Image: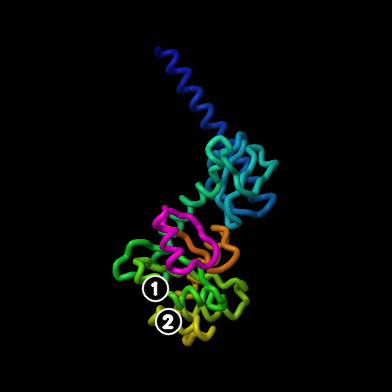
Amino acid sequence: MKRALGFFLAGALSFGVQAEADSSAAKAALEEKLGIPASELNPAPIAGFFEVVTPQGLLYVSADGSRLIHGNVYDMDNGMVNLTEQTMGKVRQDMLSQVEDSMIVFPADKEKYVVTVFTDISCGYCRKLHDDMADYNARGITIRYLAFPRGGQNSQAWTEMEKVWCAKDQQQAMTQAKASGKASGARCTAADSVGAHYALGATFGVNGTPAMVLEDGTMVPGYLPPERLLMSLQSQ
């Protein structure tokens, strides 16, 4: 029995050392060949690969660092479950919890659901969503905004959204900016939130606005009217 336990422990230790060595090679390949930071690698649902969350989303890298997969992995033996989205849902939940203090929140009086929205003041459907805010709130849906100016750092929307995040009354500033495309005020340290939110959106795979993230980490691209969003939340 002791001998068997010894073999087991030795095998487990050997596996752990080998896994660490393999992940080091995969990590080095990402950073040195592609310049992509890789803070943590975990075994992927593909034999011989690791999965890593990067600023470009979830990537799969072979243990020897020679192969890269960017895309969704599905479990064909389990109802075509999207394993990539399953992982990213957990990642989004964790990352959103780290930026809660920098969100602009429109709370429901009788909150039942919380939806986080990547928004842009120059986006027509983002304005439509904001116009419907009272209706979302009346249905018990709290809306939390993160900044995602689609034109990037050199766009006018980026500058105006920095002003929104620096405003004393952020809710009023957001409403004004959504209506006119302009916000009053000047840049401050809170403006750094715009860049942080934008980078977070890229990691999440946001490529348009509005982009909604539900409480379980599921991402819903595009605009949903209040009644349809409520139905989607109730079905989860």
Q: Quadrant of residue 140?
A: bottom left
**Is residue 217 rendered magenta in the image?**
yes
Question: At which x and y percent is residue 181?
Answer: 54, 83
Q: Which mark is residue 167?
A: 2
Give, as a three-letter code, the residue at label 2. Answer: Ala
Q: Nearer the viewer, residue 210 or 96?
A: 210
Q: Is the residue 117 above or below the residue 160 in the image? A: above
Of callouts 1 and 2, which one flags the residue occurring earlier in the amino acid sequence? 1
Q: Quadrant of residue 206?
A: bottom right
Q: Nearer the viewer, residue 157 or 211?
A: 211
Give, as a three-letter code, the residue at label 1. Answer: Asp
Q: Secondary structure at mark 1?
A: helix
Q: Which residues are magenta?
A: 215-236
**Is residue 118 rendered magenta in the image?**
no
Q: Secondary structure at mark 2?
A: loop
Q: Residue at x 36, y 67 (%)?
A: 139
Direction from residue 14 to residue 229 in the image, left or right: left
Q: Nearer the viewer, mark 1 or mark 2?
A: 1
How many residues crowd mark 2 within 10 Å: few (<14), some (14–19), many (20+)?
Answer: many
Q: Which residue is mark 1?
A: 135
Q: Residue at x 34, y 71 (%)?
A: 138
Question: At which x and y percent is residue 233?
Answer: 41, 58
Q: Residue at x 46, y 20 (%)?
A: 8
